[in-house]
Image: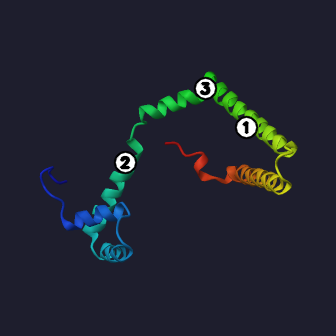
């Protein structure tokens, strides 16, 4: 074990970079060749890996993580998010429908711009539905849906 005042050796710095996956591919290959030939260096890497694992396992949850977990269970938060999303979707759909209707019945607008605007709206609608369908079908396969901060 080193004292706090001592600076790490180049080998110790290389071992730290190796454990943290910060070495370039050529440096990594050369370091791995040294690991096979130098048992003390291999022991240092094993020690650093165990320290890294211990540090990750023993890190306490952040206060913000606890608060997010509480908010996820709060019925007011759930209802607010659900009602807010519902209102946004319904009002946006209503506004879009009203705008499309207004464009369709406007006598001052020529046929070509009407068709182009309606086709554009239909294209965005199809695009949105295709993206939504893809997200819903792949959600169960997404590994990041269960990752906690």
Mark 2, residue position? 54
Q: How is the image coloured?
A: rainbow
The correct choice, above or below, for 15 with respect to 116 in the image is below
Q: Nearer the viewer, residue 41 or 124?
A: 124
Q: Nearer the viewer, residue 118 or 92?
A: 118
Spatial CA span between label 2 and label 1 = 50 Å
77 sits left or right of 108 in the view: left
Residue 77 in percent (x, y) is at 60, 26
Residue 103 location (% of width, % of height): 82, 45
Q: In the rendered image, which residue does mark 1 sit on?
A: 92
Q: Residues within 10 Å of mark 2 (few under 14, many from 20)?
A: few
Label 3: element kind: helix
Q: Secondary structure at mark 1?
A: helix
Is residue 13 or residue 80 the one in the foreground? Answer: 80
- Tell me the residue at 33%/60% (across/down): 46
- Residue at the limit of the structure toward the top, as seen here: 76
Q: Is residue 65 above or below residue 40?
A: above
What secondary structure is marked by label 2?
A: helix
Report the residue marked by disc 3: 77
First-in-chain label (1 vs 3) = 3
């Amino acid at each position: 074990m080193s004292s706090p005042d001592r600076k790490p050796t180049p080998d110790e710095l290389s071992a730290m970079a190796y454990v943290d996956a910060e070495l370039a591919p050529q440096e990594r290959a050369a370091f791995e060749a040294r690991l096979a030939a130098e048992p003390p260096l291999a022991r240092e890497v094993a020690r650093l890996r165990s320290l890294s694992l211990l540090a990750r396992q023993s890190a306490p949850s952040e206060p913000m993580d606890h608060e997010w977990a509480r908010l996820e269970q709060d019925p007011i938060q759930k209802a607010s998010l659900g009602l807010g999303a519902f209102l946004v979707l319904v009002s946006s759909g209503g506004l879009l429908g009203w705008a499309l209707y207004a464009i369709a019945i406007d006598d001052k607008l020529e046929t070509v711009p009407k068709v182009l605007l309606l086709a554009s709206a239909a294209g965005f609608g199809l695009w949105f539905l295709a993206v939504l369908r893809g997200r819903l079908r792949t959600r169960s396969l997404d590994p990041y849906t269960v990752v906690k901060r």
